[in-house]
Amino acid sequence: MSAEGPSITGSGDVPTVLVRDGQNRQLLCFLEQLIPLDGHDYALLTPVDTPVCLVRIAEGDDEEDEVVEEVDAAESILTVADVVLQEHDLTLVRSAVTLTVSGELEEPDPDDLEDDLQGDGDGDEETDLYEMLIQFRAEGQEYGLYIPLDPFFVVARMQNNEAVLVEGEEFERVQPRIEAELEDRENIG
């Protein structure tokens, strides 16, 4: 897709939008909702590829698994993840907003998912929100790429037929209003 042309395309029933962040990274998303606020159209989007998060897996019982927030600083670890994913015909994409994995992922067995969600009683609630995609060792430490089980939404402002990621203060300002608008739409429908 050219950077010059419109970034809204109609593939299938749901249009897609290319979102850019401040570092000019891109993320292709499905357009779920358009919400007009303060003279701007805000878009609620879901990534086309599967969002994942990088987690440092705790080695001892007294430690907790830790989500790696600064993925830019973890490039050497992500390079190892790239190799492991390639063995499964998957590709790690350093997208805007989140890391994503492209390729054909196996759909989880609904029975396994139900068991995972119910847990065994000693599971920590945080792990019930994610499904492990891969686990690997890098720099002497265990890591995993996890898929969030809850829908992953991205908020963008539509501007000149392009989607600009909403971050920081603007996100803090519009997020509660977008949620209220969506709740109103749900109550009407």
Image (cartoon, rainbow, N blue to C red):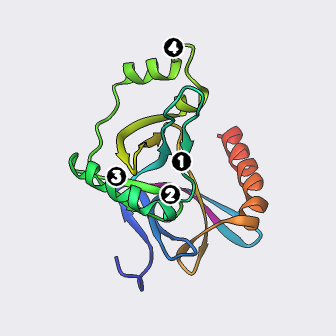
Q: Position of residue 134 (x, y in %)?
A: 35, 40
Mark drawn on residue 144: none
Q: Nearer the viewer, mark 3 or mark 4?
A: 3
**Left or right of residue 175, residue 88 in this image:** left
Q: Earlier in the sequence, mark 3 or mark 4?
A: 3
Depicted 14 relative to depicted 23: above or below: above
Specify few, some or many for label 4: CA neighbours under 10 Å numbering under 14, 14-19, or 20 or more. Answer: few
C-alpha span from label 3 to label 2: 15 Å
Q: Amino acid at mark 3?
A: Ala
Q: Which residue is mark 3?
A: 81
Q: Which is nearer the eye, 14 or 53?
A: 53
Q: Is residue 150 magenta?
A: no
Q: Which residue is mark 4?
A: 120
* Whether label 2 touches label 1, CB < 8 Å: yes
Q: Position of residue 119 (x, y in %)?
A: 51, 18
Q: Which residue is mark 1?
A: 152
Q: Which residue is mark 2?
A: 98
Q: Earlier in the sequence, mark 3 or mark 2?
A: 3
Q: Position of residue 55 (x, y in %)?
A: 49, 44
Q: Amino acid at mark 4?
A: Asp
C-alpha span from label 4 to label 2: 30 Å
Which stretch appears magenta? 42-48
